[in-house]
Structures are given as C-alpha cells and as structure tokens.
Image: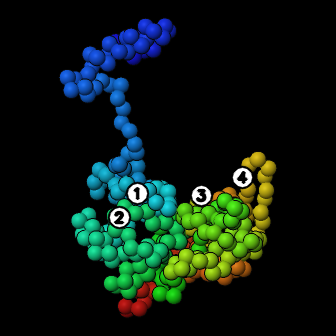
Amino acid sequence: MPFHVFKSISDPVLRSFVFSIIHFLCSCRDGSCVCSFDMARGLKKHLKRLNAPKHWMLDKLGGAFAPKPSSGPHKARECLPLILILRNRLKYALTYREVIAILMQRHVLVDGKVRTDKTYPAGFMDVVSIPKTNENFRLLYDTKGRFRLHSIKDEEAKFKLCKVRSVQFGDKGIPYLNTYDGRTIRYPDPLIRANDTIKLDLETNKIIDFIKFDVGNVVMVTGGRNRGRVGVIKNREKHKGSFETIHVQDATGHEFATRLGNVFTIGKGTKPWVSLPKGKGIKLSIIEEARKRIAAAAAAAASTA
C-alpha cells in the first residue's frame, strides 16, 4: 500500500489494523522487520569532501570523503581536526595510518592535554604542542578567514584567551562562567561579564587576568566576511530586538562593522596579549597584494644578481 493512501485513512481503528497487517507481512521469521518504516538513527558518521568547510583547503580530487570532526569544544565548521593539522599543515605524516601512529604514541597535546582522537576538533586560540620537537602552535585566523598555525614560544604556550559566553549562579548561589570552548569555571572575578575575555592558565585551569569588552580595546574578528582582521573597537551600536553592531578600525585606519558575536577581545588598548601571525591582521586589497608580490619578487631578483 502506498504511504499516502495509508495516511488518508481517518478511522484510527482501521488505521491500526492496516498497520499491523503491513508490519506482519514485512517481518521475517525471527521477528526483525525489514519494512521501509524503519529509519536510520543518530548522527552521520561521514563527511563528503565537497561539504567540508572551505577553510580546511582540501583539494576536490583528493578523495570522496573528508574527516568528520568528533564532538568537542568547537563546532564542526569552526574547527580543524588533528589529522589535518598533522598531515596537511605540518606535514609530519603522509597518510592516515601515520597520523594514528603519532597520536597513539601520545606526542600531541591540545591545551596541555594529550589527545589521541584523530578527528579531535581544535579551534580558535587552542594551543597545539608537540614536546618531541619542542614546538608550540596557536590556532589563529589569517585575513582570508583560514586557520593559521602560528608558532609560539614556551612561555606563551602556558596560557590561552577564552571569550566568556555567560555568567550565571548555580546551586547555593555559587557563581560560574561559561567560555566559548565549553569550559565552566567557578568563582570568577565579580567584574567579569559576558563577552569579556579571560586569560586562562592551562596548567592550573585558573583565571590569571581578564579583559573587559570596552571601546578602545584591540579585538580579532572570528566570523563573517571580516574574519581574521584585527583592530580597535571604535563604537558599539545597540539595536533593540536585533544584533548588536561593533565598529572596528584596523592599524591602517580602515573601518568595518560586524556583529557582536563575531568579535573576540585579545588585548587591552592597542597591544594584544598574544602574538599575531604574519600581516598582524591587516587585510590588503587585491591591488595592494599584487604590489607586495611584485616588490618581493624584485627584491629577490636583486639579491641573487
């Protein structure tokens, strides 16, 4: 019987009787039903390469599938799985099996904790450490919105910046805050509010310092068309019942606007608390990029001559 005909039966008794007959006819001797009424359950465990985020920079002809990020502190489309960090970016592995061999030897740490899951989702501001090579990297964005593994020193690898999502009170009036990467920290400073940034010690998981979300502080944009740009907050527009707009000015004097949820405070005043990748978050136009490439090529030719 077609499904639309089955749905058109209005009498509940007749409908139940017809359904029981269909179930009996579709069932096997052992009682397992092979009828089309059964549907798949749970999340998809695969990800097609064409559906993978653009900032992963996977080539289209490199295979049918891409690594599906595991559940973790960052969203699937706002993270970079460890397999892509080791194989595609750092080139420490050539194949999938080599990545598993490296991780199972407990060589890779994310935010000070050993991670053996090949698809663990590392995200913005996470510190990826490889003690065997004495290397530390912080995941930041470049001005084109792509993840950049920025090499940092051992001192800087001891902390990370976390954006505060909310500040609430739990049982018995205990205050706690939630961060952008899923952390819950109890007894924070009473001055900390939502959208502020805390400086977190990765060894003790305690708050060292915090940055208020105020006009005049330096920020990095983590979403939208301006992702990866760095600048100073100039104005904050509040729209009742809609998104709050933040106006930012970069070091070259160019101004742009974005939503409040896309802004991440990274320092007090104009000085960031973390080192920035090449370019310092200043977005160049197509003409400026072309001129820069021509000047670099001319300088290289002059040095070899």
Q: Position of residue 116 (x, y in %)?
A: 34, 68
* Rendered image: mark on residue 270: none
**Mark in the foreground, 2 or 4:** 2
Q: Amino acid at mark 4?
A: Phe
- Of the numbered discs 3 and 4, the one sitting upstream in the chain is 3
Tell me the element at label 2. loop
Q: Quadrant of the N terminus?
A: top left
Task: Classify 262 as above or below 45.
Answer: below
Q: Is residue 293 left or right of residue 254?
A: left
Spatial CA span between label 3 and label 4: 13 Å
Q: Residue at x 59, y 77 (%)?
A: 206
Residue wearing tag 4: 243
In the rendered image, which quarter is residue 207 located in?
Answer: bottom right
Tell me the element at label 4. loop
Q: Are marks 3 and 2 in contact (CB under 8 Å)?
A: no
Spatial CA span between label 3 and label 1: 24 Å
In the rendered image, which quarter is residue 272 located in?
Answer: bottom right
Q: How many marks?
A: 4
Q: Amino acid at mark 3?
A: Gly
Q: Confirm whether residue 4 shows in the render.
A: yes
Residue wearing tag 2: 117
Spatial CA span between label 3 and label 2: 29 Å
Q: Amino acid at mark 1?
A: Ser
- Of the numbered discs 3 and 1, the one sitting upstream in the chain is 1
**Mark in the foreground, 3 or 1:** 1
Residue wearing tag 3: 224
Q: Amino acid at mark 2?
A: Asp
Residue wearing tag 1: 70
- Of the numbered discs 3 and 2, the one sitting upstream in the chain is 2
